[in-house]
Image: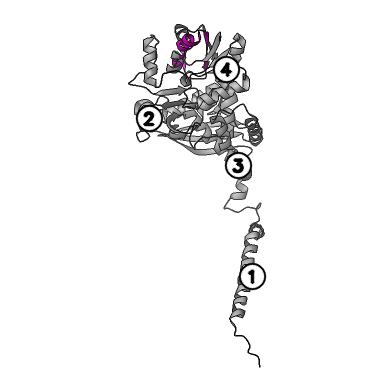
Amino acid sequence: MKTIVLAYSGGLDTSIIVPWLREKYDARVICVAADIGQGPDELAGVRAKALASGAEECYVEDLREEFVCDFIFPTLRAGAVYNRKYLLGTSMARPLIAKRQVELARAVGADALAHGCTGKGNDQVRFELTYMAFAPDLPVIAPWREWDIRSREDAIAYAAARNIPVAATKEKIYSRDRNLWHISHEGGILEDPAQGPPRDVFMLSTDPQDAPNEPEDVRIGFDAGTPVSVNGRELDPVDLIAELNAIGGRHGVGRIDLVEDRMVGMKSRGVYETPGGTLLYSAHSELEQLVLDRRTLAAKDLIAPRYADIVYEGRWWTTEREAYDAFVDVTQQRVTGSVALRLYKGSAAVIGRQSEHALYDERFVTFGEDDVYEQSDAAGFIRLYGLSTRVRAIKDQELAATRSASAEGASEPALVGA
């Protein structure tokens, strides 16, 4: 192999992979780092760090708007939630990063693709399914499945031996993944699900105990299921999520502690912060409840966990996902309006909703006098609605009567002949 393109984050794993690839394959290594909203601190110096580690080049790609419009919003509109809690922040980002990695690999004439995912995790599947979709001809190098490094402590020692600077230490060894949508925390004390997360784990949200003592109201506007405004102010997709992250974060909204089911069969424990995403899911769900009929809602609720599985398992580039998107697009045509939430000490309560497409109509539901609903019609409706129940009961009564008559006949004494 002459050229290997590596999905690069600048974290512990990918930092040591650069010299490892050069040592093992004697190939030039080109890194691809994606800006998906992890923040300037994490991206600062990432190219210089890659070059210092031995990479020939490092491309830093701004994928934030594509991430929001083509991955976050479709998943939000589908209502997809994995394992009852997880809003899929890491899962959604991997297919996008891997696709851009393939595009750059094609541009530089690469012979192979590489990633820093461990053999225990989900990300290896997400990256490699994307590689299969866009570059089935290119071999994949996954160092964690090949080398002798067996732990994060080993990785830190490897980096130290080669003078590669890394943020992780043996004392603070959390594994984090951050983007515009969320941040995840794993490792260290979090590997014991009986232990609560220490206060210093959290980075995006205030501890609810320390959140403001006064509630804050926020109104989120949607157009055809897509969020477009905050408190009446229209924002572009990236700024909208950043704004909601700031609002939700200062009130401690969006923290979850989850023991989740990984694809490889094990359970793992992760702590997630998704402040803006939590507000969007709450508001979007409430607006759907206002404008969609109950059977459409029920059908969409059936699809939501299936969509979540697709995202979590890295099966983004599939006909199944495209088909679900087509269904969701139809359901979202009238999901236009706004929802008001009240944030307080980690909670986000719905306090109002409005839409020109609302199926709620006060003329029909009022307890006062009205002239649009004929209450006597309910009697005929109930008779038809419960017809199958009534027929079943009548049949049971008739059968019971027949059996009773048969039993009485059998108990009569037989006539004695002359």
- Give the mark toward the camera: 1 or 4: 4
> What amino acid is found at the position of numbered circle 1 in the picture?
Glu
Q: Is residue 37 magenta?
A: yes
* Colour scheme of the rendered structure: one colour
Residue at image coords 51%, 25%: 123
User: What whole-number distance in Å separates the C-alpha atoms at marks 4 and 3?
Assistant: 44 Å
User: What whole-number distance in Å separates the C-alpha atoms at marks 4 and 2?
Assistant: 35 Å
Q: Residue furthest bottom?
A: 418
- Mark 2 vs 3: CB contact within 8 A: no
> What amino acid is found at the position of numbered circle 3 in the picture?
Leu
- Give the mark toward the camera: 2 or 3: 2
Residue at image coords 37%, 10%: 161
Which is nearer the N-term, disc 1 or disc 4? 4
User: Magenta region: which residues?
Assistant: 17-42
How many other residues sit within 10 Å of disc 3, few (<14), some (14-19) or many (≥20)?
some
Residue that label 1 marks: 398
User: What whole-number distance in Å separates the C-alpha atoms at marks 1 and 4?
Assistant: 73 Å
Residue that label 4 marks: 139
> What amino acid is found at the position of numbered circle 2 in the picture?
Leu
Find residue 133 and report its image quarter.
top right
Q: Which mark is residue 297?
A: 3
> Mark 1: which secondary structure?
helix
Vertical position of residue 248 compared to residue 157: above or below: below
